[in-house]
Amino acid sequence: MDKAAEGSRLLLQQEGGDGDRERLLMIPQQDADVIVGDGSVDIKGRPAPKHTTGNWRACFSILGNEFCERLAYYGIARNLVTYLKVKLHLGNLEAARNVTTWQGTCYLTPLIGAILADSYWGKYWTIAVFSSIYFIGLAILALSASVSALQPPTCLGTVCPEASLLQYGVFFIGLYMIALGTGGIKPCVSSFGADQFDDSDPSERAKKTSFFNWFYFCISIGSLISGTFIVWIQDNSGWGIGFAIPTISMALAIACFFAASNIYRYQKPGGSPLTRVCQVVVAAFRKRHAELPNDVSLLYEVDGQISAIEGSRKLEHTNELKFLDRASIISSADVKSESSTDPWKLCTVTQVEELKILVRMFPIWATTIIFSAVYAQNSSLFVEQGMVLDKRLGSFNIPPASLSTLDVISVIIWIPLYDRILVPIARKFTGREKGFSELQRIGIGLVLSILAMVSAALVELKRLEVARSEGLIHEKVDVPMSILWQIPQYFLVGAAEVFTAIGQVDFFYDQGPDAMRSLCSAFALVTVSVGDYVSSIILTLVSYITTQGGDPGWIPDNLNEGHLDRFFWLIAGISFVNFVVFVGCASRYRYKKAQ
């Protein structure tokens, strides 16, 4: 009988809620080398073929989707502070606080999308559902900017009527639907793209880092177009069309994503990661008095190469956090009651190691929050600083929000510079294929973010010096100092972003447990959220403390009377202390080892 016709018998033993069960798959021997080895399936649920699914052929649609989606997002975010001040008549501090709070929400909602993707829906359907919510929110926002009844009357001189409850309501409902939509898809798109490369194939696995670089490159191009073309449209042709363009772009993003559905590789959801974490804690607590064996091989783990967790490789045991290992102790009671089928009483070593990984990553996660607080200034106080500088460049006026595209240009320059020049040089010294480790890359970015705040503080010192010399301290007017002085701070923020932001994405995807990759990608995004909230809290505290006794404070509506430079120095100082803590945490971090 022909071997190919006979087929090969592949026995996969899985542990389920009803006990051990065996699943027999008949795969022809001739097809064994053309099926992906990481468990991915095609759109019909069959093992995914190597040569007709995934790889770069599928990633082009994902990159196109990300480009259009980021164009839509930044088409709103880049100039949002201007809309809040000019159209909704909010003050400097209130507008900055609203922007940072909304941006924080945009990077907090990824937790919702990640949990749904890893537990129930999978990444593909999670992206589909939240993209629809995203589109509806953009449409509402475009409507609120186009219908005069949904906007407050224009200012009469210095008197600006306050927006009504309805006008605020419609605008912020649309704005926070966008926050839910963009947050829901963010942790899924990057990890779904990385899933298109077979983890079991070294040649494909090496392409993942390249994918992350191109992924971020597409984000930057979308941001660049938004910060120049769309911001110019909003400032010169009206907010209605300025918000309609992002809405159309999001429609194109959805179409682009669905276009490649037949060639994607899909990872099946592995069940609730939160449930698995709780099971380890409960099982360890139940056996808190049990004695750990000296031989770790006596801890519970399923036989064979396949993990008991759907979509996950086995993880090697580590000696850290040993009290959690009690969840894997096989007691005499477990043997007698056959409770090995109940993960609330007995967990595999791999399941315990999942929780250990999350605990080890927490200090790294916490020490990257301040970077996000620094980046938040890029779309709020940097813009407000630019609004009181001389915006003329010959006969052309530079919109302050457009200058923030310099950090995007910096990203576009730094990505190939990093990939083609810095990595080969670093590789000679470190011996690492990536040149720098993920944590080294993040640390370099943190240093650059400190320098960005120092640059912004020096520019503000110079601006206030010019304001004093020109007698403009008590005048709410632009200072005769070119807005181009802001170029260094934007360029440094962009460089920091290439190192820290991309390093974060790579770190949390690579170090996260296989069945928690959406959730771990969300952790990287949540640092942005928490950083925005930290920035908002610092702004509130600074406003409260510095306005005591009737003083105008550091950040008054008339920045010529304030001390914005002191706020930038404060952020730089906090960032330096945070960097020292990060170095300590990174030096103690232990990378995961999968079998």
Image (spheres, helix red, strand yellow):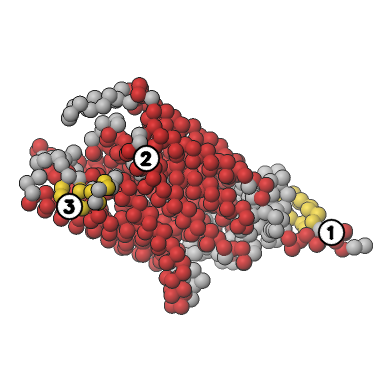
Please rate how many residues cluster around mark 2, counting C-alpha atoms within 10 Å: few if below 14, some from 14 to 19, many from 20.
some
Q: Is residue 572 left or right of residue 293?
A: left
Q: CA distance from mark 1 to mark 3?
A: 77 Å
Residue wearing tag 1: 7
Expressed as whole percent of the image width and height from the top left, the position of residue 69 reads 48, 44
Extreme residue toward the bottom, this view: 428
Quarter of image, res 458: bottom left
Secondary structure, mark 2, is helix
Q: CA distance from mark 1 to mark 2?
A: 62 Å
- Relative depth, front residue between 577 and 357: 577
Question: Which mark is in front, 1 or 3?
Answer: 3
At a point 52% along the width and 62% down the height, the residue shown is 209
Q: Earlier in the sequence, mark 3 or mark 2?
A: 2
At a point 93% along the width and 62% down the height, the residue shown is 1
Which amino acid does the dot numbered 2 rest on?
Answer: Ile
Quarter of image, res 230: top left
Secondary structure, mark 1, is loop
Residue wearing tag 3: 481
Residue wearing tag 2: 233
Tell me whether circle 1 and circle 2 mark residues in contact (CB < 8 Å). no
Which amino acid does the dot numbered 3 rest on?
Answer: Met
Q: Which image quarter holds the C terminus? A: bottom right
- 243 shown above or below 590: above
Expressed as whole percent of the image width and height from the top left, the position of residue 468 reads 8, 49
Tell me whether circle 1 and circle 3 mark residues in contact (CB < 8 Å). no
- Relative depth, front residue between 366 and 264: 264
- Relative depth, front residue between 539 and 89: 89
Please rate how many residues cluster around mark 1, counting C-alpha atoms within 10 Å: few if below 14, some from 14 to 19, many from 20.
some
Secondary structure, mark 3, is strand
Q: Is residue 565 left or right of residue 265?
A: left
